């Protein structure tokens, strides 16, 4: 009997979810179970819509192989972002060349309805580390002109210098949506005993 009830609930959950448009502006139908209603995409996801699409990328690295005065730059880089999970997450795939080597990054950007914050996780072919960032709990959906500010940390493998290998490095990603056709991602590091520095900047221009 429990198996039958569980299967029936799962069918209802999937049917309810499938019936909704990924980026619907209307609130979820009240007939859905409360848990399913709380899982539906809303204002937090809609605010990310300008980031979807295909983009030309100008990437600059100001640490490791680059400096503030002479940043290392990417070549021929592009990003494609599309909605997955019925409009819950933006899947980011960035490819190109960096410092003469092939570059690849994949990421997931979403809005946590329960904690009311943005979250961003990436993996690339330059480090063996998943980079995870979270905005402040209760910071809410982005509004026009407001930057998305998310914090994280990682164990340094030498990116900020050999003296910091194995140390914990606070980091921050800031997303600024300037228009439907241009936005900027910036990563900041705070080395041990030092001030926060700009580590990485990616400028995205929409490909028609």
Image: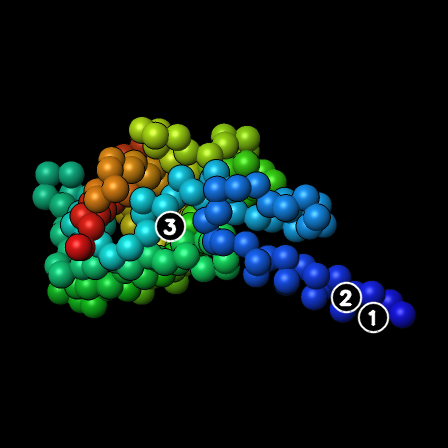
Q: Earlier in the sequence, mark 3 or mark 2?
A: 2
Residue at (48, 38) in percent of width and height: 43
Residue at (82, 65) in percent of width and height: 5
Marks 3, 2: nearer the viewer: 2
Protein image colouring: rainbow
Q: Is residue 3 visible?
A: yes
Q: How much space separates mark 1 and mark 2, taking CA atoms?
A: 6 Å
Q: How much space separates mark 3 and mark 1, taking CA atoms?
A: 50 Å
Identify the disc placed on residue 156: 3
> Which sits in the foreground, 146 or 163?
146
Which residue is label 2 attached to?
8
Disc 1 + disc 2, Cβ < 8 Å: yes
Q: Check disc 2: other Cα within 10 Å, few if <14, some if 14-19, many if 20+.
A: few
Q: How much space separates mark 3 and mark 2, taking CA atoms?
A: 48 Å
Q: Check disc 3: other Cα within 10 Å, few if <14, some if 14-19, many if 20+.
A: many
Identify the disc placed on residue 4: 1
Q: Residue furthest right?
A: 1
Q: Earlier in the sequence, mark 3 or mark 1?
A: 1
């Amino acid at each position: 009997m429990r198996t039958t009830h569980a299967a029936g609930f799962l069918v209802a959950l999937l049917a309810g979810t499938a019936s909704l448009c990924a980026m619907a502006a209307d609130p979820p139908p009240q007939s859905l179970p409360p848990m399913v209603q709380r899982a539906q995409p809303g204002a937090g996801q809609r605010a990310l819509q300008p980031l979807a699409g295909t983009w030309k990328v100008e990437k600059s690295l100001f640490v490791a192989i680059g400096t503030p005065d002479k940043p290392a730059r990417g070549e021929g880089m592009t990003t494609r972002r599309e909605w997955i999970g019925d409009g819950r997450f933006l899947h980011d795939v960035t490819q190109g060349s960096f410092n003469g080597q092939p570059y690849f990054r994949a990421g997931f950007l979403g809005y946590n309805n329960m904690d009311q914050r943005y979250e961003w996780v990436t993996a690339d072919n330059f480090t063996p580390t998943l980079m995870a960032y979270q905005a402040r709990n209760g910071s809410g959906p982005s509004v026009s002109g407001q930057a998305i500010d998310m914090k994280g940390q990682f164990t340094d493998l030498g990116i900020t210098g050999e003296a910091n290998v194995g140390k914990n490095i606070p980091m921050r990603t800031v997303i600024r949506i300037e228009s439907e056709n241009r936005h900027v991602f910036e990563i900041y590091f705070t080395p041990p005993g030092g001030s926060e520095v700009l580590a990485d900047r990616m400028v995205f221009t929409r490909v028609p």
